[in-house]
Image (cartoon, grey):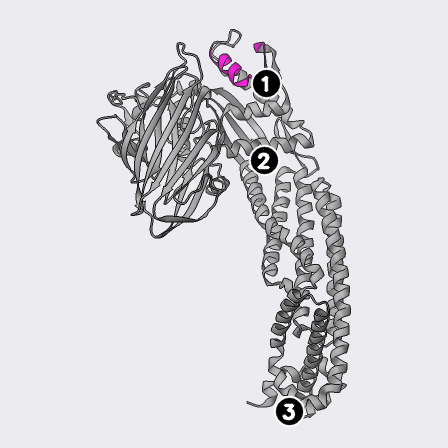
């Protein structure tokens, strides 16, 4: 292959021709070999100068007599020398001829590089100062000032990039061969992109601040329409998302060690926040998408008030509902009523699950939340709502009175003169229960009217919150969502996935290892569950052969006095890994669960599958069945006022640990239930715990324990190695 073809790049390099004073026309007339040789000799001279410059840096490091840092620096510099290997052999043969030119050219390049480095640092430092200022302004919700600060930061970085490009132009592209130049370019690009992201974020935050909550829904403080504002916010989110993706890629390529030592820590601190920003922004992106899908367009929202003082699988007894027709952020219609108003419209005679059949011979909307998996119960709720005359809901929200009580603590008491009561966070549950049943001033046939009258007043109070109170309002929503006092379901698959990703969908989650969820359903209509203190203790034993046995103790105490109708009669299901084998159980009440079904009733397919999977332990009466990919042990317990009782279950898990294996426990809280203490004790023979995602208590060579507050779903995991 001809030299001309091999070194086509050098032959046509106009930068070299400019430096050498050779015109293009003359160059074309020369033989390619001579052009290549001149270019190659110039390259060698550059690298000689570069190597000498690197040695000067090493000499400075040695002079500091900080031997640990010097050793690291030597190692780094030696790695950089590897870049010059292609020409170092030739240097040995040409050093006598090239050394004077190499020294002069190399030191000139080194001096220019040092000057460029200083300029770059100065502009970058100025940009970072604007970053810090913008961060403070964002925290103070001064979005316009934050946008200006991000713009100034971007200009500083652009100036630094211009300085670096000018140097590269003067050197005819040679600077691109130096590692420091490439790192500096990457750093500047990343900083520019970060400033652009910051600007877009301040724009998005300003757009978000234009949204206002009113009694009639959402309004926009500017002249923009609600849909137009959402479109602009969506465009901002997309731009931020692209910018963060670019930053993430660049950060992986930046070698922190190539930066001046005095600036490395600053770089790590300033740009590390962007890694955190990426995760936080994805949450913000999902929240915005959820808001857009929920309130943009046209949605029918069914809100269920589930009374957790009469606990059921998904939170509580469905006593009231609110049907909301929302379009483009505005509430077109709002209807709050008692569930009994709908249940009276049901024409079909549908058979309830067997435990409910003991107290009611027909299945209605009020008992439709039987299944522990909220998405499945929500589908039943939607079906009953349609059968009872309602339009198919697009979104179903189940909430307990805890949310309203927390909101009343934020807004202050609400006077209800029509009912001669003042509702507060302390008395809301009690007074609305009384008003819902036999309050003297309650309008005829409107047992839930007090709730219907409260909703617009509460909406009006919420629309007048201060900026500080708005932050508190969001914290209240977050707390109730994560503690499963609010559950959400949507027929829209994208929105439903968002609910699941945030842990707000109330689904029974899959797990290939240990799992536990205790689900109680109060079926005797006594409002007593807020007075039931429940604690759980799980003792896990890992045997030598890897088999695992769990011993669960459920302790329940009724704080109410021993009076008529203060008892609590609940059907309790304990959900464990599918295939678990029940070895012992005690503490339940043996109760006949085979009440005869009325003739001609329709049977729901999911109820039929639930019942067909169940078998009865003839000694204790405990039902062993399958539900939502789990095995459940179900039975009754009646707890009188003032009484304390224990339920004990011993069962073997369907898998064994290998020599090196993980043990994990997915612990799911029942929606609507109050916080309860949970103690987990693990014993392991011939094994050593190598890792855990929690800080174990009372750790010994063969056991540990863990105590926590069961106020939300939690995952506990550990890795064991056989000794």
Distance from Cα at disc 2 to Cα at disc 1: 32 Å
- Circles 1 and 3, Cβ within 8 Å, touching? The answer is no
In the picture of the structure, the residue carrying the numbered disc 1 is: 424
Q: Position of residue 57 (x, y in %)?
A: 71, 72
Q: Position of residue 150 (x, y in %)?
A: 72, 51
Q: Is residue 331 left or right of residue 205?
A: left
Q: Position of residue 248 (x, y in %)?
A: 59, 57
Q: Is residue 543 left or right of residue 1?
A: left
Which of the two labelled residues, at mark 2 and mark 1, occupies the earlier sequence position? Answer: 2
Q: Nearer the viewer, residue 438 or 107?
A: 107
Q: Position of residue 54 (x, y in %)?
A: 69, 74
In the picture of the structure, the residue carrying the numbered disc 3 is: 33
In the picture of the structure, the residue carrying the numbered disc 2 is: 328
Mark 3 is surrounded, within 10 Å at the Cα level, by few (under 14), some (14 to 19) or many (20 or more) other residues, namely: some
Mark 2 is surrounded, within 10 Å at the Cα level, by few (under 14), some (14 to 19) or many (20 or more) other residues, namely: many
Q: Nearer the viewer, residue 111 or 610?
A: 111
Identify the image quadrant of residue 424.
top right
Which of the two labelled residues, at mark 1 and mark 3, occupies the earlier sequence position? Answer: 3
Q: Look at the image and give the residue range highlighted in magenta.
A: 419-437
- Residue at image position (43%, 44%) is 717
Asked if residue 434 lies in the magenta stretch, the reply is: yes
Q: Determine if residue 155 is in view.
A: no
SS for dot 2: loop
Which of the two labelled residues, at mark 2 and mark 3, occupies the earlier sequence position? Answer: 3
Q: Residue furthest left?
A: 618
Task: Tell me the tag on residue 530.
Answer: none
């Amino acid at each position: 292959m001809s030299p001309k073809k091999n070194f086509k790049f050098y032959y046509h390099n106009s930068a070299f021709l400019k430096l050498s004073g050779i015109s293009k026309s003359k160059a074309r007339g020369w033989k390619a070999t001579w052009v290549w040789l001149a270019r190659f000799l110039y390259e060698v001279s550059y690298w000689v100068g570069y190597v000498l410059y690197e040695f000067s840096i090493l000499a400075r490091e040695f002079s500091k007599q900080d031997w640990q840092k010097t050793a690291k620096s030597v190692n780094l510099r030696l790695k950089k020398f590897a870049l010059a290997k292609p020409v170092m052999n030739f240097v040995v043969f040409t050093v006598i001829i090239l050394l004077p030119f190499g020294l002069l050219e190399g030191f000139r390049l080194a001096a220019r590089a040092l000057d460029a480095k200083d300029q770059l640092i100065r502009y970058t430092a100025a940009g970072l100062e604007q970053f810090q200022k913008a961060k403070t302004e964002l925290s103070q919700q001064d979005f316009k000032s934050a946008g200006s600060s991000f713009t100034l930061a971007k200009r500083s970085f652009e100036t630094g990039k211009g300085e670096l490009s000018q140097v590269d132009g003067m050197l005819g592209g040679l600077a691109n061969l130096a590692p420091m130049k490439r790192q500096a370019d990457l750093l500047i690009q990343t900083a520019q992109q970060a400033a652009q992201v910051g600007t877009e974020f301040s724009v998005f935050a300003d757009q978000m601040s234009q949204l206002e909550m009113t009694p009639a829904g959402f309004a926009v403080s500017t002249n923009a329409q609600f849909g137009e504002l959402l479109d602009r916010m969506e465009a901002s989110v997309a731009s931020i998302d692209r910018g963060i993706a670019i930053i993430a890629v660049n950060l992986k390529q930046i070698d922190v060690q190539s930066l001046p030592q005095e600036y490395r820590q600053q770089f790590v601190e300033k740009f590390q926040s962007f890694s955190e920003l990426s995760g936080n922004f994805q949450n913000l992106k999902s929240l915005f998408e959820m808001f857009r899908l929920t309130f943009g367009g046209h949605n029918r929202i069914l809100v269920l008030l589930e009374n957790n003082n009469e606990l059921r699988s998904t939170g509580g007894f469905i006593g009231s509902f609110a049907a909301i027709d929302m379009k483009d952020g505005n509430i077109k219609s709002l209807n709050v009523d008692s569930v009994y108003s709908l249940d009276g419209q049901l024409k079909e005679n549908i058979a309830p699950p067997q435990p409910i059949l003991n107290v009611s011979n027909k299945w209605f909307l009020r008992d439709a939340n039987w299944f522990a998996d909220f998405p499945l119960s929500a589908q039943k709720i939607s079906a009953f709502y349609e059968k009872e005359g309602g339009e198919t809901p697009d979104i179903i929200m189940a909430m307990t009175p805890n949310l309203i009580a927390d909101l009343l603590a934020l807004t202050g008491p609400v006077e209800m003169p029509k009912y001669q009561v003042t509702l507060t966070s302390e008395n809301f549950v009690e007074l609305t229960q009384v008003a819902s049943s036999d309050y003297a001033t309650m309008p005829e046939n409107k047992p839930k009217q007090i709730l219907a009258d409260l909703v617009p007043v509460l909406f009006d109070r919420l629309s007048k919150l201060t900026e500080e109170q708005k932050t508190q309002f969001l914290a209240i929503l977050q707390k109730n969502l994560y503690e499963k006092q609010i559950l959400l379901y949507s027929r829209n698959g994208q929105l439903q996935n968002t609910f699941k990703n945030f842990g707000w969908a109330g689904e029974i989650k899959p797990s290939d290892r240990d799992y536990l969820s205790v689900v109680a359903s109060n079926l005797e209509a006594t409002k007593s569950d807020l007075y039931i203190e429940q604690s759980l203790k799980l003792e896990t034993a890992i045997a030598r052969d890897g088999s695992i046995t769990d011993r669960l103790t459920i302790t329940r105490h009724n704080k109410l006095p021993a009076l008529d109708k203060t008892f609590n009669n609940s059907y309790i299901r304990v959900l464990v890994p599918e295939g678990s084998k029940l070895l012992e159980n005690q503490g339940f009440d043996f109760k006949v669960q085979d009440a005869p079904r009325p003739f001609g009733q329709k049977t729901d397919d999911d109820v039929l599958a639930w019942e067909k999977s169940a078998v009865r332990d003839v000694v204790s009466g405990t039902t062993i069945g399958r539900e939502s990919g789990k095995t459940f042990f179900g039975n009754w317990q009646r707890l009188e006022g003032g009484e304390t009782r224990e339920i004990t279950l011993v069962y073997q898990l369907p898998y064994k640990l290998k020599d090196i294996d993980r043990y994990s426990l997915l612990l799911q809280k029942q929606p609507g239930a109050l916080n309860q203490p949970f103690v987990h004790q693990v014993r392991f023979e011939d094994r050593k715990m190598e890792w855990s995602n929690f800080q174990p208590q009372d750790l010994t060579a063969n056991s540990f324990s863990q105590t926590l507050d069961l106020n939300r779903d939690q995952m506990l995991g550990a890795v064991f190695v056989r000794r």
